[in-house]
Image (tube, rainbow, N blue to C red):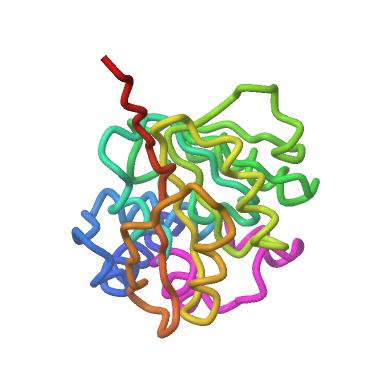
Amino acid sequence: MSGEVSALHAERIGNLLEGCGTPVSGAEAERLGAFLALLLKWNARTNLTAIREPEQMVRRHFADSVFCARNLPEGTKTLLDFGSGGGFPGIPVALLRPEVSVTLAESQGRKASFLREAVRSLGLRAEVWAERVEEMPVGRCFDCVTLRAVDRMLDACRAAAERVAAEGTMMVFTTERLREEAKGVLPGWSWPSVLRLPHAEQGLLLVGSRMMFHVEHES
């Protein structure tokens, strides 16, 4: 019976995620379906997301995350999902990009417990950091840091910048209304890519990095 449910999820998920970049394969849809089943089970007793209907979860949370996974900068080997919550975008990234080592940062106990169970049961190449990101060891940095639906987004962007490697990237999920505010919060950063999210009318994905300054020495 569980296999039939998983197969049904996979078929429908593939259809719902059209337009998120490269179409998800059958195997990828199966893995995403397993995550969806786990999310639904835990969400019944723990408030991981206010969205309860499975197809809406896929359209809103999964679509954003798959789009992020498809648009990770080339060469990304480590990724920090800042304020991971129910695992978005970090868990779908780990599912679709197994070559990337993902750290899911979530300080709320119940959500962190869910993330640990997801990592264990889905066999992900990922770890859970169940403290505030600011409490990570000094100097621990990542090729890419993602932020989606975190509290106090602008403050979070400042904290996240401290965890981006010298030539790394930050990917910020935001809206048209907050676009310029989000871009302006970090002096010394450039945001050359502004990508429109596939199933969100006002949703954007900003992709930024530190501006590199070259000092010319007199001969």
The quadrant of the image that shows the N terminus is bottom left
> What residue do we see at 40% from left, 52% from top?
190
Left or right of residue 15, residue 88 in this image: right
What span is colored magenta in the figure? 39-63
| Residue nearer the viewer, 133 or 104 | 133
Residue 45 location, quadrant: bottom right
x, y (%) of residue 135? 76, 32
Q: Does the magenta stretch include residue 52?
A: yes
Magenta: predominant secondary structure element? helix
Query: Is residue 70 a member of the stretch shown in magenta?
Result: no
Extreme-front residue of the structure: 219
Q: Which residue occupies the extreme top position in the image?
A: 219
The image quadrant of residue 134 is: top right
Residue 186 vs residue 62, the one in the foreground: 186
Question: Along the horizontal axis of the image, is 12 left or right of 128?
Answer: left
Viewer-proximal residue among 105 and 207: 207
Question: What is the x, y in percent for residue 140?
Answer: 59, 24
